[in-house]
Image: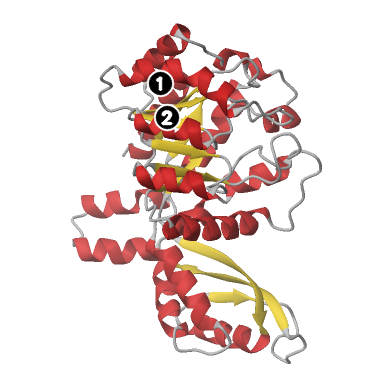
């Protein structure tokens, strides 16, 4: 006898020649999920507790809920995927706002909380002289050589930016930004790139329009379509848009940022910006929680640990923690010495559902993900 890793349940059942329908049912019984519910009415809390128990799940509540000591409470819901599917169906006919909770729960359960063990790798090209990592700065012909190397090393997306957005950075004019990236964009547009997508990292309309008109397919916008004119450009070129969360501006964002619950706040932000994108007819989206953009160390770690929260929206999730200062706060180090910390954060992000990893060191990430994938697939 040996203990079985839950990740291996489906593979073992297939080896046992279990019926396919049975495998799907039993897989749902093998995944235990937990959900934090905020500001639940005491009446709703009592109903949810009883309904959860009736399907084999449970709800942790504060003492005094049964006697209605409080008007509203927070709760912790727990159960297997199958139990929670049954509970969500029950709550669709219940009062006290439980119908809304049921719909939200169904949204979570519809999407797997994990991704494949091999994400897309997005290589970073900074066409600037002041990005925080000197080895990511490439101008002119050097940028093209760097792109070629990243593609050879395993990048399937190349993200090109012409203005630094590191903490404390100063804005440059759209004209200067375009001057930095236009020569690189022109060369890229003149060549064939099999299986590679190109992304423009900008929130300037002029820069985005230039890149998208030259065949770039992704708009990486750190303001998450704050500018409606930019949204119109994205729609015009049918671009995939990366919606990133940040607090404040690059110049001020690290001046005492604070969150009561960073994961819930970022999730609410995504909900609002997804709705805005859809209002402009933009359907192809990627969600980026914005590691290092107006976040404390603990905020960054929580976002990576609880990344599965954002899978409920049904879009790809991007994480970019490459060589960022969160690593330095945990293990003091220069930017050039943060590869090990970067790989640790990114492997955890992949384990928790990241579909795209934005990084400077493509070869090392490609190797790490291959080994990680092999660990997951071994029988």
Residue 210's tag is 2
Q: Is residue 220 visible?
A: yes
Residue furthest to the top in view is 141
Q: Is residue 140 left or right of residue 76?
A: left
348 up-or-down from 67: above or below: above
* Label 1 element class: helix
- Residue 118 location, x and y as percent? 38, 35
> Which badge, 2 or 1, comes first in the chain's sequence?
1
- Residue 286 location, x and y as percent? 44, 46
Q: Is residue 162 visible?
A: no
Q: Is residue 94 left or right of residue 10?
A: right
Q: Residues within 10 Å of mark 2 (few under 14, many from 20)?
A: some
Q: Are marks 2 and 1 in contact (CB under 8 Å)?
A: yes
Determine which quarter of the picture holds residue 314: bottom left
Residue at 58% x, 21% y: name it. Answer: 176
Q: Nearer the viewer, residue 246 or 369?
A: 246
Residue identified by numbered label 1: 185
Q: Residues within 10 Å of mark 1 (few under 14, many from 20)?
A: many
- Residue 328 location, x and y as percent? 72, 27
Q: Nearer the viewer, residue 275 or 335?
A: 275
* Label 2 element class: helix
Residue at 57% x, 46% y: name it. Answer: 289
153 up-or-down from 284: above or below: above
Which of the image's four quarters has the C terminus?
Answer: top left
Determine which quarter of the picture holds residue 259: bottom right
Residue at 35% x, 28% y: name it. Answer: 156
- Residue 150 location, x and y as percent? 41, 18
Q: CA distance from mark 2 to mark 1?
A: 8 Å
Residue 61's tag is none
Q: Nearer the viewer, mark 2 or mark 1?
A: 2
Determine which quarter of the picture holds residue 65: bottom right
Residue furthest to the bottom in view is 67
């Amino acid at each position: 006898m040996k203990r079985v890793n839950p990740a291996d349940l489906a593979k073992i059942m297939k080896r046992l020649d279990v019926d396919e329908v049975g495998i799907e049912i039993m897989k749902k019984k093998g995944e235990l999920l937990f959900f934090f519910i905020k500001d639940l009415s005491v009446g709703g809390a009592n109903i949810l507790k009883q309904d959860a128990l009736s399907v084999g799940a449970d709800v942790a509540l504060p003492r005094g809920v049964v006697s209605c000591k409080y008007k509203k409470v927070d709760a912790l819901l727990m159960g297997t995927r199958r139990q929670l599917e049954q509970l969500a169906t029950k709550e669709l006919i219940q009062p006290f706002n439980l119908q809304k909770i049921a719909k939200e729960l169904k949204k979570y359960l519809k999407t797997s909380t994990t991704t494949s063990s091999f994400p897309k790798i997005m290589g970073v090209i900074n066409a600037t002289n002041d990005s925080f990592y000197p080895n990511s700065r490439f101008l002119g012909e050097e940028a093209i050589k760097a792109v070629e190397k990243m593609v050879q090393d395993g990048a399937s997306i190349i993200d090109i930016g012409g203005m630094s957005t590191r903490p404390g950075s100063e804005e440059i004019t759209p004209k200067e930004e375009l001057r930095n990236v236009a020569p690189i964009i022109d060369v890229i547009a003149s060549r064939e790139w099999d299986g590679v997508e190109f992304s423009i990292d900008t929130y300037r309309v002029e820069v985005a329009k230039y890149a998208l008109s030259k065949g770039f397919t992704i708009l990486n916008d750190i303001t998450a379509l704050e500018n409606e004119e930019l949204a119109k450009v994205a729609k015009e070129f049918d671009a995939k848009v990366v919606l990133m969360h940040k607090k404040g501006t690059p110049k001020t964002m690290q001046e005492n940022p604070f969150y009561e619950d960073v994961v819930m706040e970022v999730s609410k932000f995504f909900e609002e910006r997804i709705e805005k994108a859809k209002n402009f007819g933009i359907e192809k989206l990627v969600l980026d929680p914005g590691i290092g953009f107006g976040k404390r160390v603990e905020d960054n770690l929580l976002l990576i640990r609880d990344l599965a929260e954002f899978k409920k929206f049904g879009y790809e999730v991007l994480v970019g923690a490459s060589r960022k200062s969160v690593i330095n706060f945990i293990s003091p180090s220069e930017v050039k010495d943060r590869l090990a910390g970067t790989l640790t954060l990114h492997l955890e992000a992949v384990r928790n559902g990241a579909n795209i990893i934005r990084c400077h060191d493509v070869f090392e990430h490609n190797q790490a993900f291959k080994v990680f994938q092999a660990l997951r697939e071994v029988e």
